[in-house]
Amino acid sequence: MTIKEVAKKAGVSISTVSRVLNNKNWVDSKTREKVLLAVEETHFVPNGIARYLGGEHNETGIIGALFASPVSSFLTEYDVFYKIVLGITDITDQHGKCLLLEHAKEDYQNSDQLPNMIKRGLVDGIIVGGVPINENLIRDLKKTGRALVVIGKYKSFPTHRVLVDNFGGGYTAAEHLLQEGYKNIALIAGSLDIYHYADKVSGYEAACAAYKRKTNRKYMIEAPGQPEEAGYDSMKRLINSKPKPDAVFITDPSLTIGALRYLEEHEIKVPADIALVSYGCGCNFIKTTFGQLTYIHNGDRNIGHAAARLLFDIIEGNAQDEYDITISTRLIIGSSSIREKRGAKQRPVKH
């Protein structure tokens, strides 16, 4: 349905319909009621971009989300950004806005590589996040003058950020295994050059220190590259270690899937042969394929909620100074880490 058909139904000019839709004051009440009734009966929805380009409105009704992921699993159900995007759309729908999702270039160098909708200013605000995103991109996004929220730790240019307590998640995962009485706890992590992996490893190390348990470097595997393949190869390496670890903390869902496939192929039982705690493995695919794992819930959809709400606060002028929002994590206990007969719990050292 077009504005021309609305005008015809209301018996007025197209310009009169436009003035009513844009809340101009110089339309009498009777005419305004006729136009609004015609809009309702025709189910007409104004085109936000057309109104913006025509100078009739200073907002487009579109929120940009710019994400980067170094793996092919981007936006699969077990990728963290899948849930984040769902969280963002929960909030944009509440505000009657549309979401434009773009994938950031991994080798971003300058503003020529910005997506056209962002470069031309056709979004009201931008949410950005993902591993390969760099400081050059953050700088150029700030230069657009649009409201900006960053998911993750990017320090060079002050901006509003949504963070996850990855250190706390790593600590909780290791603490749970220690309290279950496991002695040789291994770790599989992605590249430690990536801040969220490094934070999880730091939490794991802190828990081991608090429980007076020395970390064994041969059990701590840094596994960059394609996560499922890296998880598969890392688990193979751990199983063939002598002595073999009795538990493992895995810092990423895709790494976990690869590790579990190795265990499944070689008929190695969880937790009888090796216990397992993963980070962020609550999706239906993993539950259906591998059962109820013990995992750290990382907030996923709440990250999207927080980022979108903060962005609308900025757009509406309710968030002036840059600040951080930190999403907490929690342990979800499944069958992959519980001993049939628990060992005696140790008490952590006071900090």
Image (cartoon, rainbow, N blue to C red):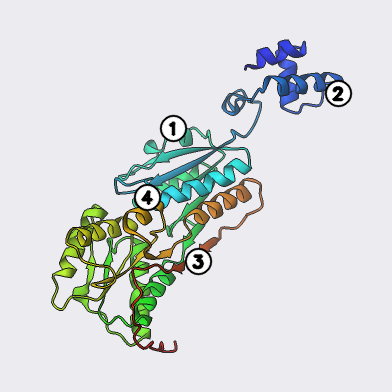
Q: Mark 4 points at which residue?
A: 133
Q: Name the residue under label 3.
A: 328
Q: Disc 3 residue type?
A: Ser
Residue lying farthest to the front in this orientation: 340
Residue 333: which quarter of the image?
bottom left
Q: Depth check: give the residue in front, 224 or 315.
A: 224
The residue at 47%/46% (across/down) is 85
Q: Disc 1 residue type?
A: Asn
Label placed on residue 29: 2
Q: Name the residue under label 1.
A: 116
Q: Position of 27 compared to 151: left or right?
A: right
Q: Disc 2 residue type?
A: Ser
Give the spatial CA distance, label 4 vs label 1: 17 Å
Give the spatial CA distance, label 4 vs label 2: 52 Å
Q: Dot 4 lies on which element? A: loop
On the question of residue 73 being in view, the answer is: yes
Is label 1 or label 3 in front?
3
